[in-house]
Every structure is written in C-alpha cells, then in structure tokens.
Image (cartoon, coloured by chain):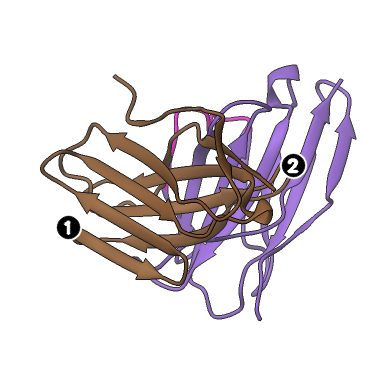
Amino acid sequence: EPEVTQTPSHQVTQMGQEVILRCVPISNHLYFYWYRQILGQKVEFLVSFYNNEISEKSEIFDDQFSVERPDGSNFTLKIRSTKLEDSAMYFCASSSGVKETQYFGPGTRLLVL
Amino acid sequence: QKEVEQNSGPLSVPEGAIASLNCTYSDRGSQSFFWYRQYSGKSPELIMFIYSNGDKEDGRFTAQLNKASQYVSLLIRDSQPSDSATYLCAVIRAGNNRKLIWGLGTSLAVNP
C-alpha cells in the first residue's frame, strides 16, 4: 500500500540553525501539506501546496518557513533559523484531490536546543 | 470559542463495550469531518470520514454527523485493547482551502 514517508525521523539542532525536513508524498497525489504538533497540544496546519505553489499558509508559517518541491517526488519544509518553540512533531500529508482524504507520514520529531 | 472541541478524557471502557467519542465544531459552514486515531508518538491515522448528515458505518466504527447541532461522533463497537489511543476529530470548513482544523483529541483506554 502506498504511503507517505518522511526523513529524518528525529532531528536535534541548535537554536538559530537551519533545518530541512523531507517528505515523499504518495506518488499520484497532487496536494501536499505540512502540519505540526507540539507535545501535548493539538495538530496545527502550517501550509498547503498545489501546482508548485503555496495554496494557503497559517499564521505560524512566517518568513522563517519555506516549502519546496525540488523534483517530482520530494516535498521539503525548511526552517531558516530555528527557535526553541519550533520543537514539535512535523507531519507531512498528501491527498489525490481537493475532496480527498489526507494521508499522513510518520512525522519528524524536531528538538531545538 | 474553540473551532473544534473534544472532551480530552480519558474515556475508559471495558473490552467488548461500545466507546462513544464526541466532537463539536463552531463553523456552521464546515463541510467535511474526519476521525483520526493517534497512538502516542505516532502520526494520525484515518479511521473514517463523513460528509452528510446521518450515520456512516465501516466495520466496528460508526460516524454520526448532525450539522444542525454542529456535532459529530464516533462509535467503536466491541472495543479492543488495541483501540486504546487518542482519537482526533478534524474538520474542513467551507471554501476552497483543504486545511484540517483539529480538536485536541480524546484519550480512550480499553481495559481487558
């Protein structure tokens, strides 16, 4: 069964460093998303991406964040200068259409020290 | 008012019983409703989705939607210890965006 994959599974970084989180969505999916979940809190939407551009972004997704689909398979989230409060689980999701269910990857646990 | 509200629990039921999980939402224009299951430290896993008023059954799971009351529920019949997890309610509002808006989740414990 096709699935969304994410790398790395864990990332530890120093405050102020750049991190890139990688995702490989399900191959025939066209809509891509990033969510995050701070420990003990609810899942929060960050950004959606379709047709090589951002469809929507949340207030959290400020200038420190960017997304890219550098080739036909990868979808990346970059945090330019990490802050302590960026520590969270980051989930990538994809869907095949606007009305279709979003399927989630296993997540990357990011710890900013 | 929170956009999606769930009782955080924990909800504790004996094995074999029916577990009932509830969710309310604030935006009357919401159009799609999802139940995800999340084990500790893992990603959300889709259980069911429902778009129309009424009941939708899939195996041991039944989702119920009442748009007039802005209420969606999930029933789990014949609960198993492996059903012990946090159940997340997520909603998509009207419009062209597809972002999921999440509740905090209800923790379910099924006791053998």
| Residue B51 found in image quarter | bottom left
Q: Chain of mark 2?
A: B
Any part of residue B95 in sight = no
- Read off the residue under disc 2: B41
On screen, B105 above or below B53? Answer: above
Co-location on one chain, circles 2 and 1: yes
Answer left or right for A55 relative to B105: left
Distance in Å between CA atoms under marks 2 and 1: 33 Å
Q: Amino acid at mark 2?
A: Gly
In this rendering, the count of numbered labels is 2
Residue B109 location (% of width, % of height): 62, 40
Q: Is residue A84 visible?
A: yes
- Res B53 label: 1
Please report the residue visible at 48 percent of the width from the left and 71 percent of the height from the top: A30
Mark nearer the N terminus (2 vs 1)? 2
Q: Where residue B62 is drawn, which disc sits there?
A: none
Q: Position of residue A96 (x, y in %)?
A: 45, 73
In this orientation, which residue lies closer to the viewer: A50 or B103?
Answer: B103
Q: Chain of mark 1?
A: B
Chain represented in purple: A
Q: Position of residue A104 (x, y in %)?
A: 60, 58
Q: Secondary structure at mark 2?
A: loop
Q: Is residue A61 magenta?
A: yes
Q: Magenta stretch: residue B104 in it?
A: no
Badge 1, how many Cα within 10 Å: few under 14, some, many 20+? Answer: some
Write down the colour of chain B.
brown
Q: Residue at x 46, y 72 (%)?
A: B59
Q: Amino acid at mark 1?
A: Asn
Give, as a single range, the part of the protein colored magenta: A56-64
In the image, which is nearer the foreground, mark 2 or mark 1?
1
Dominant secondary structure (helix, strand or loop) of the stretch shown in magenta: loop
Task: Give B84 or A18, whichever is nearer the viewer.
Answer: B84
